[in-house]
Amino acid sequence: GNIVFLAICVSKGEWGQALVYVPPILAFVIGVIIAESIKNNSSRLFILDWVQVVLILEIIILFIIGFLPRTVSDIVVTVTISFVASLQTSSFRKLVDSPYATVMCTGNLLSASRSAYTAFIKKDYRSAIHTIRFFTVILSFLIGAILGGIITPILGAKAIWSAVFILVCAVMFFSVDIRKNTRELA
């Protein structure tokens, strides 16, 4: 979205307004670089799995955002969320055996629709499973957006802590999965 808004402002010659969209784009790029660095260097730098490190970094950042007063400029929050979104996007790109996005729905809707078509037309069981997976992700995104719309007017900036709660659960699930896999290998 920021790239589209940047392009629209540039096309209108609104250079000052266009500059507003540059920091979130740069934050996204920096987030990808940091996520890749964590992934490539985690065995040397951390005692945790790289996925856990990324999730913990997201938790810390989002937790801090919940403390920001309303007087803080929206651009600070936008840039920070863009950074966290890039960590998430670059770290979690596969759902079992299919590419997917955790912070956007358009690609997931495309994949779900294609899989549904193939499942229906060709009676393909594997495509039916993919359809269910993708529509589950889309439904989860929808439920999260609805809950966010409900709790944000009540909790304000602290509503971001609901995402922190979900990420903490994810870290715990990854910890259990890593321990299970380690025991199976032993």
Image: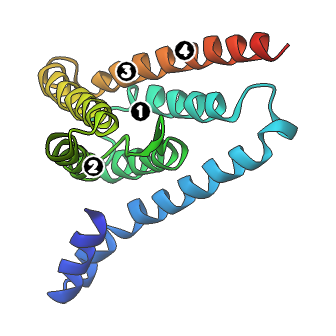
- Residue 7 is left or right of residue 84, and the answer is left
At label 3, which amino acid type do we have?
Trp
Q: Nearer the viewer, residue 55 or 176?
A: 176
Q: Nearer the viewer, residue 168 or 23?
A: 168
Whichever of callouts 1 and 3 sits on the residue coming sooner in the sequence is 1
Gap in angstroms between the C-alphas marked 2 and 1: 33 Å
Secondary structure of the residue carrying tag 4 is helix
Q: Residue at x 37, y 24 (%)?
A: 163
Residue 142, horizontal then vertical, whole percent: 17, 31
Q: Which residue is mark 1?
A: 65
Q: Which residue is mark 4?
A: 173
- Residues marked 3 and 2 touching at CB (< 8 Å): no
State the mark number for residue 111: 2
Nearer mark to the viewer, of 3 and 2 = 2
Secondary structure of the residue carrying tag 2 is helix
- For the image, the number of numbered tags is 4
Whichever of callouts 4 and 1 sits on the residue coming sooner in the sequence is 1
